[in-house]
Image (spheres, grey):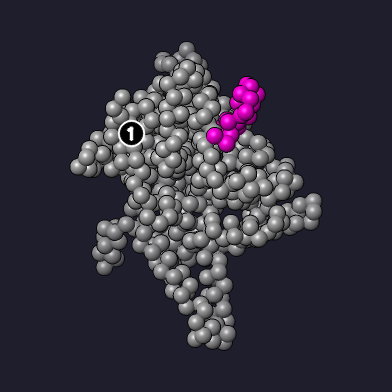
Amino acid sequence: MINMLQDLVQELHQPSVVFGLVCGLLYILSVCKDRPQFQKVISTSRIWTTVLNKYLAYKYLLNGASMIEEQYAQSNGQPFVIRTPEKMNIMVTSSAHIQEIDKAPRHQLSLHAVAKEFLQPKNTMNGFEWKDQRGIEGTGFVRAIRNLLTARLPELIPRLSTVIEDQIQAEVTQAKQTKDGWGRIPLFAAAKHIVTRTNCAVFFPAELSSNPEFVQAALEFPEDVFFAAEIIRILPRGIAPFLAKLATKNHKSTTVMYNFLYPVVQKRMELSCLAPELRGEEEPNDGVQWLINTTPKRESWSTSRLVGEIMAVWYGSLHTLAIATTYALVDLYSRPEYIKSLRAELSSSMFFQFQSTSEGLPEMDSFLKESARLSAFESTGVRRQALEDFRFSDGLLVPKGSWVCVPHRAMMRDDRHFPEADRFDGRRFLPRLPTPEALEASRLSQRSNEWLVWGAGRITCPGRFYAVVVLKLVLANMLQNYDAELEPIKGSRSAQWRTALIPRAGITLKVKPRQI
């Protein structure tokens, strides 16, 4: 009977089944909560009072981004609280609070603890686990991505361009064709395919990045981890692991990735212990090797530990970049008035400068930056978990176990920070005087206290330079080689889950080769 149930569930889209049950309960509660009969039951029953309180917390799951924007609008710059099913999130917006978060000791406010709760790695990543406090086991992945990958971007651009061009062509070729010759591409799915293949070409050796089984697992892995982690966070501990296994076919993508990566990493770790003259081959130049080379020397990491680190880095490199690519293309083809000038920039010497240096293209920088401002898919940033009670200098308390966050999406849509904030202006960030200093400050990849997309202070996204290069190459290929039209989007273009706004699968782009 149990086997029959498992077979039935796996024939469906398992994550949708689980989340459908949760959403159905939320809908019933939202419809009934104001009815007199329901209120009467609540007033006489402690159980139903608890149910209503849970509803108010679980409402956050389906409406978190909107709740944050509403509270931000009412807060007048003061801290406010958002309650989630698991804990309390304290939102702060002032520069003083953000600076104090940045300067807080690692044993008090932790980003690692936030990531650990988000991903539930012990249950979703083959038992991989990390400490709550950043730096205890080293931060080799930061150096590998921020330093080694960024330094190699100019030499990687030809390879990245080829992979992106090939994958976009494959998406167009495989798309359903209209009678007038357009290919109808499901945009979010295509973006995930493009980013997966591109990242594979950089992070993994050729024997893996060209293996269809491995690439498919790499594509599915972030979504499987996301769904499994959410099930484990939301549902009772007694049934959550079982349902998480059902939803991910027993964590199939995780297992496939792990089994492919383990022997590669093991062999390379053994070679790295030998003297250069004894290795017998040139050292590989890919993300796996960079992570091995930056493993903290004071720590003796096992092969399993390093494979887990690689898989955690992979999750972050694919999930966010695929969503950002989707929204950038939606914004581009929602506003075709920018296409001519962007194509002109790509036809100029500035594009060759970008190809040789990985920097430049100021108009595209400005357009992408405006897309990131208005189409930010994550409502909060600079998130930290309090490992112990933390008190700001003005007395604001973050209790142990709570999170403190910055609602940067709402802040970027605030006229106090950006004039006419609701209006999309693709040239908003173009400097009036294009001096080298002004151009550098206006780049999407640059971080500042006013631009919190990449984080703040000491902890910022180490892969931001790579992400910007990939975004520019995708848009460049689309603009240079294709004509495209965005099909009308019915309703919202995104679905909310917690603080994220995830592109809807039904967004479709009509594409055909460009006639020059």
Towards the viewer: 341 or 155: 341
Towards the viewer: 60 or 212: 60
Residue situated furthest right in the rendering: 394
User: Which three-letter amino acid code belongs to the residue tagged 1?
Assistant: Asp
Residue situated furthest top in the rendering: 277
| Stretch in magenta | 427-446
**In this view of the protein, can residue 505 be seen by the observer?**
no
Residue at horizontal 74 percent and vertical 57 percent from the top: 397
Residue at horizontal 58 percent and vertical 34 percent from the top: 429
The residue to which callout 1 is attached is 483
Instruction: Identify whether 516 is placed above or below 138.
Output: above
User: Residue 391: horizontal and vertical position, in percent?
Assistant: 76, 54
User: Residue 178: horizontal and vertical position, in percent?
Assistant: 22, 43
Corner quadrant of residue 238:
bottom left
Q: Quadrant of the C terminus?
A: top left
Q: Secondary structure at mark 1?
A: strand
Instruction: Identify whether 277 is placed above or below 339.
Output: above
**In this view of the protein, can residue 336 be seen by the observer?**
yes
Towards the viewer: 345 or 28: 345
In reply to whether residue 226 is colored magenta, the answer given is: no
In reply to whether residue 443 is colored magenta, the answer given is: yes
Instruction: Identify whether 236 is placed above or below 331.
Output: below
User: Residue 88: horizontal and vertical position, in percent?
Assistant: 62, 61
The secondary structure that most of the magenta stretch takes on is loop
Q: Quadrant of the N terminus?
A: bottom left
Residue at horizontal 50 percent and vertical 82 percent from the top: 35
| Residue 237 in the figure: left or right of residue 506 | right
User: Residue 164: horizontal and vertical position, in percent?
Assistant: 37, 30
